[in-house]
Structures are given as C-alpha cells and as structure tokens.
Image (cartoon, rainbow, N blue to C red):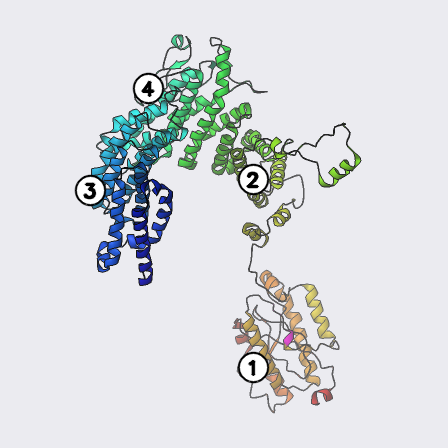
Amino acid sequence: MSSAGKEAMIANLRAITYRLSSTPSKHLPQVATQIASQLWSCKDLLSTPCDSNKQNNDASVAVHRFKTQLSTLLQDRTLEGRWSAVVLVKSAIEAGGLEVVSKSNAWVRSLLAILKKPDPSSTRCLAIISLTRIFTLTWDHANLIREITTPALPALIATCLTNVGSQRCGPMEMQTVLEAFGTLVPRHPTIFRTNEPQIRSLLGKVLSGTNGDQSSHYSESARKTSQRLLVLLSHCSPKQGAAGKWDETLRSTVAAAHSTCDRVLRSVAGNWQSTSGVRASVPHSVLYQGEVAGEGDESLGLSGWQGIFAGSERLTMLLNLVGSHVLNATSGAVAVRLGLIADLLTRTLSIRAKSGKHQGSQANSQIPKDERDALFSVLPRVHASSLRVLRILLRRFGPASMPIVQPILTQVTWVFGSEAFDSTLRPSAYQTLALVLEIHGPHMSKDDIADIEPIAKACCQDLLPSGDEKGTPIAHTNGIASKSSTAANGMIGQRYTSPASRPTQLCGLKRSAQALLPICLSSLNPAHVPGRLRTLLERTAVLTQNKDALLAAVLYPAQNKRQAGPQASLLPLVARQFPDTTGVEALLRPRMPIIRTRWMVHHDEAADNEYEAEIANPADENQGGASDFITAYSGISNLEVAGAVVRTHSSTHQLEVEQNGDQESVITRVSEKRVAERVGDDHSAKRLRTSHPAQTTATLPVESLQGADQDAVRSDTTHTSNQPQSSFVTAPEPSQQAIASTVTPTNTTAKEADDDDSDFEMPPLTMEQDTEPEDEDQD
C-alpha cells in the first residue's frame, strides 16, 4: 500500500480506538455498527503481518491499542459493553483475516466466558457465530487448529448443550447452536464424539415436536437443521464406520416411517404390497383398537405421539429425514438403497382420497369415519413430502433413478387428480414433473404424455388470469348501467374494484408453474403432444409473456401431419415482445456474420442464351470497363479483386489489335469454341452448380506486342477453355482494348493453361466490336 493510504488507515484506526475509549458503555450499542463498518476500511492494516508493522512504529502501536481496547470491552461489566465488543470482534476477524485470528486466543477465552454469563440471547448468538468463524478460518492451518480450535471447541460444545437445555434458550439461540454444530461436525468429528449422545438426545426432542408445550420454541427451520445434523453425526463413528452408521440411520428412519404408516393409514385399506420385505409393526387386532397413537423410537431418540394430526407430522418429518440422508454429502462413499426408499414412497402415494371420477382408496369399516376424514385432510402434506424425496433422488442420481421413478410417476398423476385442489401439493407436483421431463421427457410415448396431460393443463390454469383476477364491474345503485358508463367501459375496459378485494397471489405456485411451462414445450416430443395441449401451452406462454416458453415453442415447433406446408410460428410475436434479448437475436440472425457477394452468377440455360445474344449482336453498346467486374465466387477477397482489376487495366492499354477482319475471326472462333465446350461441361453436376460458362483466355507473347503483324498475333494466341472457379465475368469492352487478360511467355501451351488451377489466374475479358468512331479515341 502507498504511504499516504497507510497513514490514512492509521489515523482511522486511532479514531476508532479513541471513540471506543471515550464513549460510555451504555451508548456503545448505538455506535457499534458504524465503528464496525469503519473497520473494513482498515483491513489492509489489520491483515499486515506484525513483522511488517514493527518497521512502522505508528502502525504497530495503533493496532495494539485497538486490540487492547477490544479485550477490555469483552470483560466489561455492562451488558451493552460486552454486546458491542462481540460485534466488533466479529468485524475485526472478517477484516483482518488470518493475521487477527492467529492472535485471537485471548478473545476466544473471553467469548467462551460470555456464553456462561446470563447475558441476553442475542449476545450469546453473536458469540457463537464469532467462535464458529474463528474455528473455520483455522481449518487450512494445522498449527492454528492445534493452538486455538482443539483447546476451545470442547468447551464450546459443552456450554452450548447446557444453554439450550435451560428455559432461557430462545428459538434464535437454538437455531444458532444447531447451525454451528452442523458446520463444525464434518471437520472435527473426534471432538464431537464425546458429546454425541447428548446431541442425539437434543435432536430427538427437536424432531419429535408433538406436544405443544414442549415444542413451542422449536421452529420449522430448527427442525430442518436438526435433520441435517442428525445425518452428519454419522461422521463421529470410530474406525471409519461412518458409512455403516449412515446406512443404519437410514434403515431406522425408513422402519420408523413404515411403523407410523401402519397407524396413521389404518382407516383405509390400501393395496400396497412391500417389495423390500417390510412387515407390519403390530398385529391388526391391536392396531384397530383405541385411538390412533404411536410409540417412541429409541434408535432415533423420538418420543411417542397421539392423534392423527400428530401422526401425520411425524410421518412428514421422517420422510424429510430420509431425503436429508440422500441430500447431504458424506465423508466417504455410501451404498444408497433406492429400493427401500422407493417402497416407502409407493406406500405413501398409493393412498388417495375420493374426488370426482377418482374412486380413491377403499375405506376400512372398523375405523370411524371421523378419523378417515381427518386423514384425508392431512394427506396432501404427506404426499408433498413424498414428492420432495422423489425430487431429491432425481437431483442426486439423475438418469440412474429412472427405473424407480417411472412406476412412481403414474401414482403421482393419480394423486394429483385427487388432490389438485390443494395449493401445497400443486407446486410440489409441478417441480417433480419438471425434473422428470428434463431427464425422461424426450423418451416419453404418447400414452405417457396423456397421463401427465392433466398436470400440464392445471399448470396453464394456474398461470392464466382467472375470472376473479380480471376484476368485477362496479354495480350501479339502480341496477341499470348508463350509456355513458357503458361507452367508457367499451373504450377503456371494465371498471375494477380496489386491489384489496382481489385474491391472494401464491408466489410459490406461480414460480413452479412458470418453470414447468417451458420444459413441457422443450422436453416433450412435439409429434406426441396432442394438438389441444400444444395450443393451450402456447396460448399460456403468449398471454403470460413467458420468454423461455416462447423460445421453446419456436425452437421446437408443433408437428401437424394433417396440415400441409409450413406451420405457424410464434417467432414474430417473440421478436416484437423481446427485441433486445440475446436469445431472440440469435434466432432471428443465426448465421451472422454473412459472407457478402455483389452478384451470384448461376450457370443455367437462360444465362447462356443471353451471353450468345450479346456475342451475335455486337451493336449493343456497353461502355463498361474493368469497373463493371462482379464477384462470382465468394471465396475471393476484396483485395484480390482489386488487384485483378488493376492488372487488367494495364494489360488492356498495352495490347492494341487492329479491328478489321482479324477481330471478327477471333470472335467467331471464340463463340464456336464455347458452344463445343458447353456440351461437355453439362455432364458435370459440380460444374453446373459452381463454375461459370466456359470462357476463353487469349494469351499473347510480350515480344510480339509491338511491331507484330496480325498473323503473328493470331499464331501466338492460345485459347484456354477450362478456367478455375474463381474467374470473373466482365461486361463487353470497347474494340480498342485487347481481348486478353494475362500476358505469358510465347512457350505457354494450352495444356499448361489447363493444368493450372490457381485461383489467382487472371480471368478473361469478353470481346466486343467497337461501335464508336475512332476519331473520338484520337481526340
């Protein structure tokens, strides 16, 4: 850093230290956030090694005074002073990085002491976050782990377990402790191994969550974090037994889920048959007696539950725990039993309520109807959790999971037909179908697409504006609308009520439906999609202005075998709605930059007839010269064309041939030669596509240009018919100009001219008789 910048940082750090020392402790929380933001401007000074600061006495003194002031505040007697000190310690660690962490042993001890004091929950949360950050910064340095983390981490674990067990622990502190443990367990499993039983007991209380007075302070986010931490505790197994412990926990979770299903689903007689050897947990004679209830699970540390609603919460939690096993990473390779998980999903999705044409599951006459109705009211949430597990499998294993997904997809469509009214199930079904289509969509048959058609239609209905969203006209008091109001409504639309009367917008549902719409258009085979469904998908994409869906509709157009000719496309509409989008620009101009040519000469019969007419009728005046050259082959650069034009001008001025009978004889011979060669060229398909009409090149010796008679000129003239594809076609020239394009030595033969296929050979000039008087040229 520059000396001026360093001086500014030193001055800023001195000002911060002075403000901390001069401000009363009770007023520090009001300025702590401002001081924390100022510390970031001194990060270069705080992160400089102490050896470098020793060379500059002012810098080392400023840093030392600041750290000393923070250490004093950490031991302050007031709550405000300790809270402000914890905030500034976290800011100093982030700004100084490794240099500050390496000298933070005193701060770590002070933070651990704050956790044992009866400070507010916010102070303890900040202290836990600061300690966790210090420990994570030491991971890449073995000496710092040995000096800082290893001595302090056991004390942190024990103190946190004590605090969360007390009544003063709030939901924020519980969430902070669980997240800190989840961050540190994978890197320090041996340190957590001593406290593993206490941690499992804590997680069991959080995950049970059945009694209102016991689980009132356990939030949903705390339960999700507890599920992840329970899976990560398998790292604490000794002697590399993490994989075995992980598999054991997964088996226990699936077994507990089946046991819960036996009791929760007892009011319906399902047709599910286990494919993984799962047996009933209790006999039917005991299962159908009394109120539905479940016992605790010792392997997972779960307590018992009672009631259909508590049972549904337990089943939902166990399904989410199964998904956490697959979702979270492990330290080593594990064997995932997909059949065991698929069997559980098949059982939960096989139960569905009666709705419309769907008969639903058969009722069990031994169970009261009230319990069955309660079950059907909580089934959508259970099914949504099952679909979440299915999505986790798809994301983790991709195409390898399709053998188990294909049978379950049929059940998903059945469940959606019965519970499409639920706003919790629909987003989950849309997300699941989107993942299935991305993997298996192109391979779906017509029958498979017909099965998922109801879900695609419901997706469009959720995106299209409903009748309520369009607004309701304001009714007149007399029940008759006036003509003026009717005319106004006809011009500017209906008069709407206030926005407060409109229904609530379900953002999660809209996002899931918007994500599914373009996948339906891009992943499904257009030939297998019914026309009515395709029309609905495109109509929804247009009305909702879904750019991704419109692009997918253009890239994968519908295929209508009954309609002949080109199909209608949404490309003009896409170009009008999204003119500045890169994807739309690529669709409109997919071949930029284009190779530009001034003229493309096609070898056809009409062109030949026109050329012969020009030869036979030399009276047509054309004053064009070398400037009328046109490019016949796009492979020649503009520089080469310009060079050819210059050389042609120089040669035409040097060659002067008399215009009498010799000129007419040369024209006649050229015309006859072209007609003879055209017959042979018609047999080559390639030459018909790319080459030009056979041209004649007259090559004259340089020595015979001056003082040569007409016979010498004719004898030294060689006619070459085969020209390379890069030749030029020129307009007729005046008679005073020569009829040659290149000048070669006298020993040049026709064979050598035929063998030379160079693209740089000068093209011929078409010969025309002069129709102007010679006096004009002399003038």
Residue drawn 33% across the image and 28% down it: 169
N-term mark: 3 or 4: 3
Amino acid at pointer 4: Asp
N-term mark: 2 or 1: 2
Please state the horizontal and vertical placement of residue 617, each as a whole percent of the image.
74, 75
Location of the C terminus (image quadrant): bottom right
For the residue pair 710 and 601, the one nearer the viewer reads as 601
Mark whose residue sits in front, 3 or 4? 3
Mark whose residue sits in front, 1 or 4? 4
> Distance from label 2 to label 4 (Cα)?
47 Å
> Distance from label 3 to label 4 (Cα)?
39 Å
Residue drawn 32% across the image and 49% down it: 19
Q: What element carries label 4?
A: loop
Q: Is mark 3 on a helix, strand or loop?
A: helix
> Distance from label 2 to label 3 (Cα)?
57 Å
Residue 146's tag is 3
N-term mark: 2 or 4: 4
N-term mark: 2 or 3: 3
Amino acid at pointer 1: Val
Mark whose residue sits in front, 3 or 1? 3
Q: In this picture, which residue range is highlighted in magenta?
A: 627-632
Image quadrant assignment for residue 149:
top left
For the residue pair 336 and 84, the one nearer the viewer reads as 84
> Distance from label 2 to label 1 (Cα)?
65 Å
Residue drawn 70% across the image and 90% down it: 778
Q: Is residue 69 magenta?
A: no
Q: Name the residue under label 1.
A: 743
Image quadrant assignment for residue 538:
top right
Q: Badge 4 local density, few (<14 within 10 Å), some, or many (20+)?
A: some
Q: Are marks 2 and 1 in contact (CB under 8 Å)?
A: no
Q: Mark 4 points at which residue?
A: 297
Q: Badge 2 local density, few (<14 within 10 Å), some, or many (20+)?
A: many
